[in-house]
Image (tube, rainbow, N blue to C red):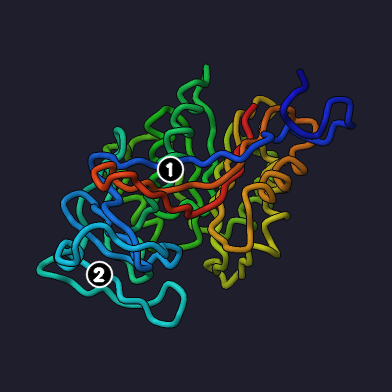
Amino acid sequence: MTDPSFPPPGAPKAGPRLAAEPTTLRTLPWSDYALLDSGGGRKLERYGRLTVVRPEPQCFWSPRLPPEVWDAAHAVFDPTDEEDDGRWRLNGVVPDTWPLTWGGVRFKGRLTSFRHMAFFPEQAANWAWLEHRVRAQATPPRVLNLFGYTGVASLVCAAAGAAVTHVDASKKAIGWARENAELAGLADRPVRWICEDARRYLAREVKRGSRYQGIILDPPKYGRGPAGEVWRLFEDLSELVGLCAELLAEDADFLLLNAYAARISGLSLAHLVSGALVDRGGVVDWGELALCEDEAAGSPREIGLSFFARWRR
């Protein structure tokens, strides 16, 4: 029986083995989050005790719950013609922030001006994987989290025992991440909070000879650094992954790359990661992250939201 992977046996070594088939990582409802219903270009979600309606254009199907359930949501995001732009329409009093929990990590939910809730619930599938990789290490690993946003992945790794370097170009996001660390009771853990352009930071780390046992990348399609640096996913991602490859220690255990972009695929990310990690060995799993409706909806539907490639030793 042949190895169900590629390149085929006997081919020149060109990096880690790519999984032969894609994987759909499904995030199921947990105590503080549920996808209650979806359809008509929207999704109805529960964040703790609050229900929220947000746009989701790929939900072509029809909602299952009656309109009065949707109408009772605490907050509805009304989009404009600009991508991610719009405004929240509130039904009653909604707090600026409220506590949420995933696993043993607490953090704040909030209604941001760009429709998100200051974290991405579909990433829970990756959080579980990261927690497992960190806890399995014999010694506390050093983990670098680039484009770390509000820090949930950083805190999951820190709670599991890692020393984390969290990098984001937004001072506001870094502030929110520090608030989450306080709420989670992890402010005394070895986490470095760095507000800087990711490429600039990586280049300096390469010069310093720094090494990490794990690296997390979740870059946006477009962004700006604190000094006006411009980030464009399709133009800049290859260089960024190459720099990350240089920072992986000899005993490195993982590299996780996630991307939200319509013109990308898990397979393309997997080839990028594999090409950067020549002679590393290991395996690159790839596919997409999906949110699953609450089973109470009956035959729960799934919404694919991002693509990933994950190298593991």
From the image, state whether disc 2 or disc 1 is nearer to you: 2
**Secondary structure found at label 2:** strand
Residue appearing at x 53%, y 28% in the figure: 141
Disc sitting over residue 76 in the figure: 2
Position above or below: 18 against 82: above
Q: Nearer the viewer, residue 28 or 32?
A: 28
Q: In which quarter of the image is the N terminus?
A: top right
Image x and y of residue 191, in percent: 43, 40
Q: Is the residue marked by circle 2 packed among few (<14), some (14-19), or many (20+) residues within 10 Å?
A: many
Amino acid on which the number 1 mark rests in the picture: Ala
Q: Which of 5 and 66 is in front in this view?
A: 66
What is the distance, in whole Å, between disc 2 and disc 1 at their CAs? 27 Å
Q: Is the residue marked by circle 1 packed among few (<14), some (14-19), or many (20+) residues within 10 Å?
A: many
Residue appearing at x 68%, y 44% in the figure: 270
Residue identifier under label 1: 153
Position above or below: 277 against 200: above
